[in-house]
Amino acid sequence: MARLRVAVLISGRGSNLQALVDACSNPAFPAEIRLVISNEPGAPGLVRAERARIPTRVISHKEFPDRAGFDAALDCALEEAGIELVCLAGFMRMLGDAFVTRWRNRLINIHPSLLPAFKGLKTHERVLAAGVRFTGCTVHFVRPAMDEGPIIVQSAVSVLAGDDPARLAERVLGEEHKAYPLALRLIAEGRVTVTGERVDISGATGPAPSALINPTG
Ligand code: GAR
């Protein structure tokens, strides 16, 4: 079976890119990464892609007078590579409405919270300040508004006494690295449909009804 042709867009470290690269390195995985694009020339994630012999492009937003020009350059690179699905993995630029609409339901993102809670930046700081007992990560289809769109996969993480933003981020990141390949696999297997801004996944069984309580003792 033909594998889904994927591009990953990054701005920095690229640990989620690495998780996707690792998943796709299994020939039985139904997707392959054909292109990695960074808007930051020095993004460490580019090295990860090169190491995996994946073609890379740097498309710096600074070289364009406006967002539309930058988005058009992205679109052109994606079309040229025959990309079917775009994964945002720590890509820290907002994409314009026209681009998002053009790639509707073919553009996904990972965010380090249980959306729709804690959209935006400094997520873990705000989670800790709010005193919530659970946080986590979300993979979702992208819509024009930031960190909004139909949810494909979520993973919950307990907030522990003594957590600081860095420790919490590390635990959430561990879940991100499982959630993103899972979402990609489900899409590539053709099991994901969006109906009325909700995602249905055919043949999926959820976890057992949760009795997770935080704190215990
Ligand atoms: C990840 O935690 C990702 O969820 C977050 O940036 C980090 C990128 O790390 N994305 C967002 O906050 C988007 N709103 P990575 O470069 O190591 O994958």
Image (cartoon, rainbow, N blue to C red):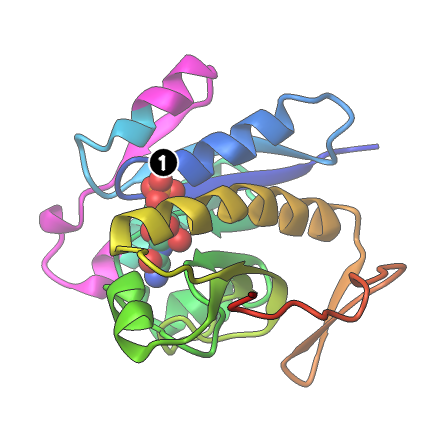
Badge 1 element: loop
Amino acid type at image mark 1: Gly
User: Circle 1 sits on which residue?
Assistant: 14
Q: Position of residue 35 (x, y in %)?
A: 46, 32
Magenta stretch: residue 58 in it?
yes
- Is residue 84 visible from the viewing direction of this image? no
**Extreme front residue here?**
217
| In the depicted structure, whether residue 156 falls above or below residue 169 | below
Q: Position of residue 157 (x, y in %)?
A: 52, 58
- Residue drawn at (31%, 56%) of the image: 162
Quarter residue 147 falls in: bottom left
Give the quadrant of the N terminus: top right
Viewer-nearest residue: 33 or 175: 175
Magenta stretch: residue 90 in it?
no
Q: Is residue 217 left or right of residue 75?
A: right
Cβ of mark 1 under 8 A from ligand 1: yes
| In the depicted structure, whether residue 211 falls above or below residue 169 | below
